[in-house]
Amino acid sequence: MTHLLRSVRNFAPSYFDDVFVHSRAVNGKTDVEVHKEHLRKLLGLMRKHKLYANLKKCIFGASEISILGCIVGKNGVRPDPEKVRVISEWPTLSNVKELRQFLGLAAYFCKYVENYAGKIRPLSQLLKKEAEWKWTAECQQAFDAVKQGLTEAPILAVADQDRPFHVVCDASDFAIGCALMQHDHEGRDCVVYYQSRLLKLAERNYSVHDKELLAMKYALAKFRVYLLGSGPFVVYIDHASL
């Protein structure tokens, strides 16, 4: 179905057999007027390819909808409050199995947390093959930081291909991270996506210059689907020689 609806994917992306139509005011038309036009185009295309929609499962004119564990609305994308509540109320971990369960759920929402990989590093160490289970104060601090990061997660902006992107990169001794950002209509910085990962053992020996360069390479690879063909974009990195 994704292939059949590719001509309307800019405003009607699909996931398996679900289609999500989003619209915003443009060229003097209200968001409702644009939304009606989008629906006509989508339904016309579905009729052409003999695709059918179950009316009982359709939602029209909603201000926000739940998609894949996220709430998407006119103000942006935020994690599902119920899933955030589950994470925030998660009791202190007592074994590796519980740790894997916690990180498995938390990782799904890592795009909302700045430097997620750096925050969970003490917990990741407990997953190593020869690691002894020892819940330290550092582990508890990391556990609390992840829960707090999701509880206070920002509303992510929906990427606007008509506005330029900018990328912010950073590197530390143990992790690299980046953020895809855009300015809103009032010129304020808005985060579209956070990404991060721990450095490999060999990468930790890189110079500061090379770590920052690695962070930039990582960012461009992660955000390439947004950046390619979008026009000029700016990369910010805190190393003078780069």
Image (tube, rainbow, N blue to C red):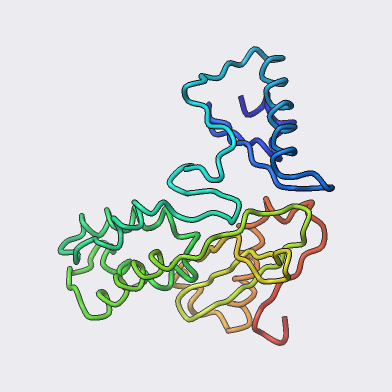
Front in this rendered view, residue 162 or 201? 162
Q: In this view, does 115 lie to the left or right of 170?
A: left
| Quadrant position of residue 61 | top right
Front in this rendered view, residue 197 or 101? 101
Front in this rendered view, residue 156 or 176? 156
Q: Which residue is drawn at 28% across and 55% down?
A: 86
* Quadrant housing the C terminus: bottom right
List the single residue furthest toward the right: 27
List the single residue furthest toward the left: 94
Front in this rendered view, residue 198 or 191? 191
Q: In this view, does 36 lie to the left or right of 83?
A: right
Q: Is residue 234 above or below residue 61?
A: below
List the single residue furthest toward the top: 50
* Residue 32: % across, % down: 69, 40
Q: Is residue 163 left or right of residue 1?
A: right
Q: Which residue is drawn at 49% across and 70% down?
A: 114
* Residue 179: % across, % down: 59, 67
Q: Which residue is drawn at 74% across and 38% down?
A: 33
* Residue 29: % across, % down: 79, 44
